[in-house]
Image: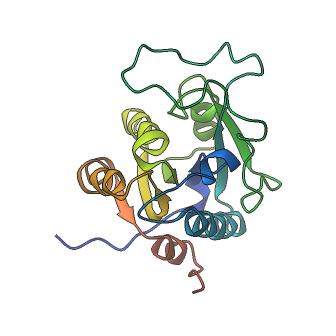
Amino acid sequence: MPERELELDPEHTALVVIDLQKGIVGMPAGPHDTASVVARAAALAETCRARGVFVVLVHVGPSPDGRDGLRPVVDQPAAWSSPPPGWDEIVPELGPRDGDHVVRKRQWGAFYGTDLDLQLRRRGIGTILLCGISTNVGVESTARDAYERGYQQVFVEDASSARAAEDHAFVFRTVFPRIGRVRQADEVMRALGRPMSS
């Protein structure tokens, strides 16, 4: 079945960028390297701001004392017990800029325990453009929550990445097409009225 041409109403659309912060961008990623993901997400954010799309920058990190962190019993624990200083700072290429909304989350998904849903609904947002790192962790968790809350979603494939290319490919092949539409950054920007420069 051929893809329908993407149509977006800027007034009722939000860009939600997941975890493009210094500590996460500083780690390896695939299939898209972090520099290209940041560049595409930044270009997309600038286009969105110019067209009046609500831009939400999400970052993750515990409170200063770390006591609000999740502590499940797991077979594969995190490599460190507490993040180093500056780990949770949003990369400067993205902002925030005037008018952006910043969400600090304490777990993988961006909805639970934050004001994200409130901020979107009070602005009449029905469609989310979603991207970031990691595809199969923060992006997918947020996407599943958005789906269950009734949002329409567009997943920006080349402005997202995972720790391993196969993890990214699995989610974009088997999960995202069932809960939204998969597009490239230049397609989204064309739908908003400005193509991405090469």
Relative vertical location of residue 139 with respect to residue 42 in this rendering, above or below:
above
Depth check: give the residue in front, 50 or 78. Answer: 78
Residue furthest to the front:
79
Residue for point 78% across, 21% down: 64
Q: Is residue 187 left or right of residue 114?
A: left
Relative vertical location of residue 84 with respect to residue 43 in this rendering, above or below:
above
Q: Residue 1 occupies which quadrant of the picture? A: bottom left
Residue 62 x, y percent position in the rendering = 68, 25
Q: Residue 40 occupies which quadrant of the picture? A: bottom right
Residue for point 43% across, 60% down: 30
Residue furthest to the left:
1
Q: How is the image coloured?
A: rainbow
Q: Is residue 89 left or right of residue 195?
A: right
Residue for point 39% across, 44% down: 136
Relative vertical location of residue 76 with respect to residue 126 in this rendering, above or below:
above
Residue 189 x, y percent position in the rendering = 54, 73
Residue for point 58% across, 52% down: 14
Residue 94 x, y percent position in the rendering = 72, 59
Q: Residue 7 occupies which quadrant of the picture? A: bottom left
Relative vertical location of residue 89 with respect to residue 55 in this rendering, above or below:
above
Depth check: give the residue in front, 59 or 189. Answer: 59
Residue furthest to the bottom:
198
Depth check: give the residue in front, 155 or 166. Answer: 166
Q: Quadrant of the C terminus?
A: bottom right
